Image (cartoon, helix red, strand yellow):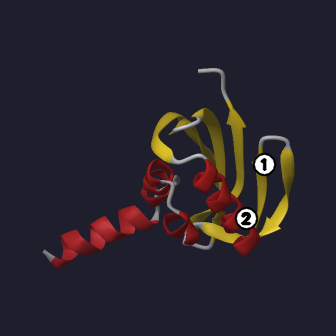
Amino acid sequence: MLACFAFCAAVLLAQDVPVGVIVALKKGSREGLTRYVGETMDLTIGSESGSKDRETALNEIAAFWETNKVVGFDVKHEGKRDESSFIVGTLKTVNGNFRVNCFFRRVGNRYVIHQIRIDKTND
């Protein structure tokens, strides 16, 4: 039993795309994203873009979610290359749909978000 638990914990820690990120996107949860953001992150929301420190990026994402209440998130593509991975999906909000590109890089034994891009779609 203990060996099974240790194996499951190791598998979860080694995931290329943390499941918690997808859950946070589905809920529009700043708190859910917090543990997956590195010290800095490139953030693009619409035409606003820049390299942000952790707190600024999380605050800007939370402000976006405040204006665009999230009702769901569907992953459309997922991939991995070398020490990085990504997801592309559709964020469903009360104000329409947004395409989300989320890129991860490996830091130590886990993957952290190093870039998020959120663009309005015509869906």
Q: Residue furthest left?
A: 1
Image quarter (top left, top right, bottom left or bottom right) of the N terminus = bottom left
Q: Position of residue 93 (x, y in %)?
A: 53, 39
Q: Secondary structure at mark 2?
A: helix
Q: Position of residue 23 (x, y in %)?
A: 43, 54
* CA neighbours of label 2 inside 10 A, class few (<14), some (14 to 19), many (20+): many
The answer to whether residue 19 is left or right of residue 111 is left
For residue 75, say whether it is visible.
yes
Q: Nearer the viewer, residue 14 or 22?
A: 22
Question: Relative to residue 51, is residue 109 depicted above or below?
Answer: below
First in residue order: circle 2 vs circle 1: 1
The numbered mark at residue 44 is 1
> Please, what is the three-letter code of the amino acid marked with disc 1?
Thr
Q: Quadrant of residue 33?
A: bottom right
The answer to whether residue 52 is left or right of residue 31 is right
Look at 33% across and 70% down and name the residue there.
9
The Cα atoms of the two marked residues, 2 and 1, are separated by: 10 Å
> Please, what is the three-letter code of the amino acid marked with disc 2?
Ala
The numbered mark at residue 57 is 2
Mark count: 2
Q: Position of residue 71 (x, y in %)?
A: 44, 42
Question: Relative to residue 15, is residue 52 depicted above or below?
Answer: below
Q: Position of residue 36 (x, y in %)?
A: 57, 66
Mark 1 and mark 2 in contact (Cβ < 8 Å)? no
The answer to whether residue 66 is left or right of residue 119 is left
Q: Nearer the viewer, residue 67 or 89?
A: 67
Look at 78% across and 48% down and name the residue there.
44
Question: Relative to residue 91, is residue 33 depicted above or below?
Answer: below
Q: Nearer the viewer, residue 85 or 46?
A: 46
Question: Relative to residue 28, is residue 57 depicted above or below?
Answer: below
